[in-house]
Each structure stands twice: as C-alpha cells, then as structure tokens.
Amino acid sequence: MVRILVIHGPNLNLLGCRETGIYGSLTLTEIDSMLAAWAESHGATLRVEQTNHEGGIIDLIHQSMGWADGLVINPGGYAHTSVALADAVRGCGIVAVEVHLTNIFAREPIRQRSIVAQACSGIVAGLGAQGYVAACAALMEMIESGKAVASGSSRTGGVG
C-alpha cells in the first residue's frame, strides 16, 4: 500500500472564505474528504496535515522519512520564497509533487517561479482542488511503476 503525506501550507485553512474568486469555494475540509475518498478507492494510505508555519512544514517533511513513500505539498506562498522548504524536500529522500490550486504561471511575476518545485519530481498547478487528486494519482503511478525519482536525487527538470 502506497503511503502519501499531503501537506497544505499557509493560509489554506482559510479556503472557502479567502478570495473565492481566485481559490474557489471549497473548504480545506472538503478537499481533505475528496482526497480520503480517492485514497480509499485506490488503496493508498494518506496522512494529511496543514500548518501556517514554515518550520512546521519542515518538521512534517522530516517526520515523513521512514513512513511516507511520497509527498504532495502545497507550500502556498512559501513556494516562491523558501530555500529551507526546498532543502527539506531534497533532504527527505522521497518522491514529491508540488500542487497549487491556481495556475501560478499566469499570476503575478513573483508567483511564477517556485523554489520548492525545483526539489520535486513534478508540479500540478491550475486545476483547483482536483490538482490534489491529480498529484496523488501521478505520485502513486510513479511509485508503483518504479519510475519515482526521490527528492534530492540528481536529475534535470524543475521550474527555473
């Protein structure tokens, strides 16, 4: 059974009431329920966490070592600023996919580059809540097919 850690970063606890024109009307609880249903139907085990604190995200990533086969992370605004999060993803040695509700490449210039994505095997952006499901599905496929490239491994690609 594939074990996936899903981390929701800062301000995602405000989904459903925060800038619904940008982020949609689904709450984080509804997204988590959607992910739980997906996991149950696909035989995956999920651990889902949310924190507004950069250090809390780093702690969760570190704690995933030895348990998680993969990581789905929405680092929120930290995607564009946090070398520390990118280093944590690289250091954990598990395959990771970054997810964003919005298409960060169609937003303000500061949001068009993700430092964290550079440490991930892939990125899903602009699909709303379904992006989480797409990220989990892609992660599971990579892990089960043996094509997963662990974070921190030497590879090309990334968002630069």
Image (tube, grey):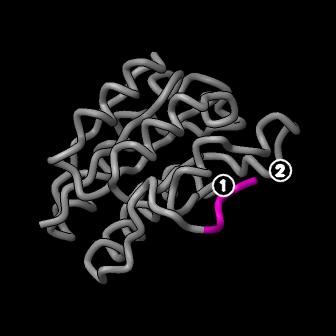
Range drawn in magenta: 156-160
Q: Nearer the viewer, residue 70 or 103?
A: 70
| Residue at point 44%, 23% (across, down) | 13
Direction front: furthest residue: 154
Q: Which kind of residue does numbered mark 1 sit on?
A: Gly
Q: Is residue 17 above or below residue 149?
A: above
Q: CA distance from mark 2 to mark 1?
A: 9 Å
Relative to residue 40, is residue 142 drawn left or right?
right
The x, y position of residue 140, in whole percent, is 31, 69
**Residue on which the image places disc 2:** 106
In the structure shown, which secondary structural element does the residue marked by tag 1 occupy?
Answer: loop
Q: Which kind of residue does numbered mark 2 sit on?
A: Ala
The x, y position of residue 84, in whole percent, is 53, 28
Type of secondary structure dominating the magenta stretch: loop
The x, y position of residue 142, in whole percent, is 37, 74
**Residue on which the image places disc 1:** 126
Dots 2, 1 in contact, CB < 8 A: yes
Q: Quadrant location of residue 126?
A: bottom right
